[in-house]
Amino acid sequence: MRVRTLSLLAAFASLASSAAVAAEAPKAKAAAAQLCNGTFSNGVSINVKAAVYMPDVGYITNAKPPTPVITAANQTVCDVHTFAWNQFLYLTQSDPKTPTVARFMQLAPWYHALTVGPKPGPYPGGPTDLRTAFLDQGQAGTDGHLIDTANQTVRYDIRFDPYMYASIVDQNYYTAPLFNTACNPDPANNGNCKNNDKIWMIPSGANEHPEPGSTEVKTAWRDFGLPTNCPSSQYFCQGRFGLVGFHFVNKTFSHGEWIWASFEHVANDPDCAPGGDEPIAPMSPINSNWSFFNTKTVPSDVMSSKVCNVTSNPPQCNFNPNPTGKAFIPVNVCRTDMISAGGASSANCTVNTSSPNNAGNVACLNATIMPQLSGVWRNYKMIGSVWVAGGVGPNQDFRIQMFQSQVQGIPYVAPSGFTNLADTTMETWLQKGSTGYDPFGTNAKQAGCFLCHNEPSAFGKGNRQADMSHFPGKLPLLKLQALKATLIKASDTVKAPR
């Protein structure tokens, strides 16, 4: 890394310093058959109450004794899911210097990180309050608006950590002209970068050991209209907005394709069919109304059968949110890719390397970790994570099976984990098997993060990206200015336009 990068990363010291303090590091345990309850295959356990930042799967910087590295080839699916839970805990907890502010709220929002000007300054950080753009309410991919049962539109926020900021600034990607110079868009190929195999986030290069990598956090917020209306006993509230979805991507030395993970509030919506951990019921698991599933408007047989059909025409759930092309309407939402029922049962907690049990392992992690949390964070569960089997190098070009065609001479890797991962608050209409309304005709086989995030991105005309991230989509000056002009603080009481 260059000097500028090092100075920018110094800003992250207060957020990640605990990772270097041996006294705070999780204790390594004697190697034994792995159970998916918060312990990695190298014997290290995550600290649920005070999570320690991990630069890679099951690895702690400067731990004493040293943490054994789990190579990508030796990582179990449980290891990666456990890493995702650890990073979520770390990002949602606070540090001693700012005990009342969750770490992810201290990350730089897109409107700070991408407006650093001709002479980039140090990492800009927060604000630690939430501000959302009224124009920035469309979901990725479909641009659909998700409207809750109270007829309010979900809003989205994106933030970058110092490592990703350093990548953007140090490599001159922070304005549209600079990014286009690095990208060299190809008009004959949907505007994709001719130099996509040269644009990488930190870590990049042939590193000798795990080191902190770029993290991008996207959150979904339910608008309760007034700051006093957000039920702070049930949701992580920022003024009038309550957190309903938390999606992050973390680039590591062993996973240059990033590790993609999603968490949701348990009261968002039920499973589409029986057999999962949140079946259709009159009330949510916290005895509240569902946020995006209205028991009064679903067909009567849905409540009796516990099935909301998503393949019928028209579908009973996950149907077209804009049927007239003029206005978005509330849609009853359900989850198609379910987490296993049974909690921390033996069947769920067992780690099977020959036939990975993703839904069961995540169920065991949720059942083990969530009860240990305090306050509203007990109401947020992991819905899955996805990566590629065996990982790829941090600056390695590759293609993904199921989602892309093979290219001779370039690694052709298989997705692993929740292959069709979709957050019901962020990719509502791009869920696996949700084919009654299928915007792109991809839900049967290609639903999931890697549908849009791959190298080079072939999804959508002019879909520019840098190392699997779509942050360049916010760089065009007029769009950036329009979005910034609509930012409101979470404490504002102005009526949200539709």
Image: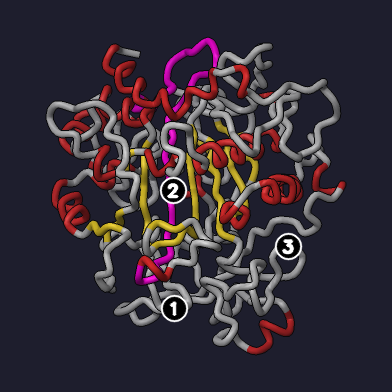
Of the image marks 1 and 3, the number of the one nearer the N terminus: 1
Mark 2 element type: loop
Foreground: disc 3 or disc 2: 3
Q: Amino acid at mark 1?
A: Ala
Of the image marks 2 and 1, the number of the one nearer the N terminus: 1
Foreground: disc 1 or disc 3: 1
Magenta: main secondary structure: loop
Image location of residue 160, percent across then percent down: 36, 38
Q: Amino acid at mark 2?
A: Cys
Residues packed near mark 1 inside 10 Å, few (<14), some (14 to 19) or many (20 plus): some
Q: Label 3: which residue?
A: 276
Residues packed near mark 3 inside 10 Å, few (<14), some (14 to 19) or many (20 plus): many
Residue drawn at x 54%, y 27% as measured from the top left: 411
Q: Amino acid at mark 3?
A: Gly
Query: For the magenta stretch, what is the residue range?
Result: 198-226
Q: Label 1: which residue?
A: 150
Image location of residue 356, percent across then percent down: 76, 41
Image location of residue 365, percent across then percent down: 71, 45
Q: Is residue 107 above or below residue 162?
A: below
Residue drawn at x 20%, y 53% as measured from the top left: 484
Q: Tell me the distance, in whole angstroms, between the alpha carbons under discs 1 and 3.
A: 26 Å
Residue drawn at x 59%, y 34% as measured from the top left: 51
Residues packed near mark 2 inside 10 Å, few (<14), some (14 to 19) or many (20 plus): many
Q: Quadrant of the C terminus?
A: bottom left
Front position in the image: 374 or 76: 374
Foreground: disc 2 or disc 1: 1
Front position in the image: 311 or 449: 449
- Examine the structure image and report whether residue 152 is included in the region drawn in magenta: no
Front position in the image: 415 or 477: 477
The reply to whether callout 1 and callout 3 are in contact (CB within 8 Å) is no
Q: Is residue 433 left or right of residue 464?
A: right
Q: Label 2: which residue?
A: 452
